Image (cartoon, rainbow, N blue to C red):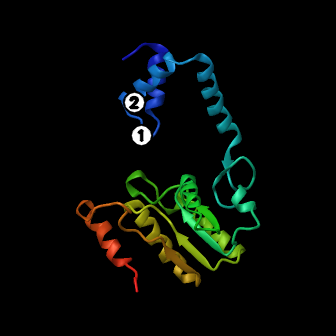
Amino acid sequence: MYEGAVQELIDELGRLPGVGPKSAQRIAFHILESDPDDMKKLATAIVTVKDRVKFCSVCGNVTEQETCSICRDPRRDPTMICVVEESKDVIAVERTRSFRGRYHVLGGAINPIAGIGPDQLRIRELLSRLSDEQISEIIIATDPNLEGEATATYLVRMLKTLGIKVTRLASGLPVGGDLEYADEITLGRAFEGRRSMS
């Protein structure tokens, strides 16, 4: 335990996701030892992002304007929506250069243990988009974990009554992975999602 401002900083850093007590202490001491101008830039960047950045009124992605650049882009296919959990997932899909449609960011995944149900996610907004826009396919790209699977299952059940094609990203073995290290769920998915080679 440290005194005053140092302990306050450690406590605040420890509230960040993925930052435990030891990491918070290391970061705090890095800040103390760093050039004051660099740390002022960091503090300014944090304040600026909180002041300027908001969520897109259409898809929920982060933006500094009312709508994000993807929603404003007329070259994007307006008939396809890729549903993701977080804004960082949009970036991951965009890096593949395989999808030219639009997105819908849920703002998380169903997680009853953490008190997150469908009402805490942007599912109503998705349904609203489906009634306003001409959508032919929804691609569900939630994480392949328990929460992501629960969210995908909920969405599929809800969306199949609307007559819109609903697909789920395939999942399985990563390139460069070894079969012996794959868990049974991943290996099972790889078998289910196999494709013809001839």
Amino acid at dot 2: Ser
Residue 175: percent from left, percent from top: 38, 63
* Extreme residue in the top direction: 3
The numbered mark, 2 or 1, whose residue comes first in the sequence reads 1
Amino acid at dot 1: Gly
194 vs 20: above or below: below
Which quadrant of the rendered structure holds the N terminus?
A: top left
Pointer 2: what residue? Answer: 23
Pointer 1: what residue? Answer: 18
How packed mark 1 is, by other alpha carbons closer than 10 Å (few <14, some 14-19, many 20 or more), is few
Q: Residue at x 69, y 37 (%)?
A: 51
Q: Residue at x 51, y 21 (%)?
A: 31
Relative placement, left or right, of 64 versus 30 is right
Nearer to us in this view, 144 or 120: 144
Splitting the image into 4 quarters, where does residue 79 fall? bottom right
Circles 2, 1 touching at the beta carbon (< 8 Å): yes
Which quadrant of the rendered structure holds the C terminus?
A: bottom left
116 vs 128: above or below: above
Q: Secondary structure at mark 1?
A: loop
Relative placement, left or right, of 92 versus 59 is left
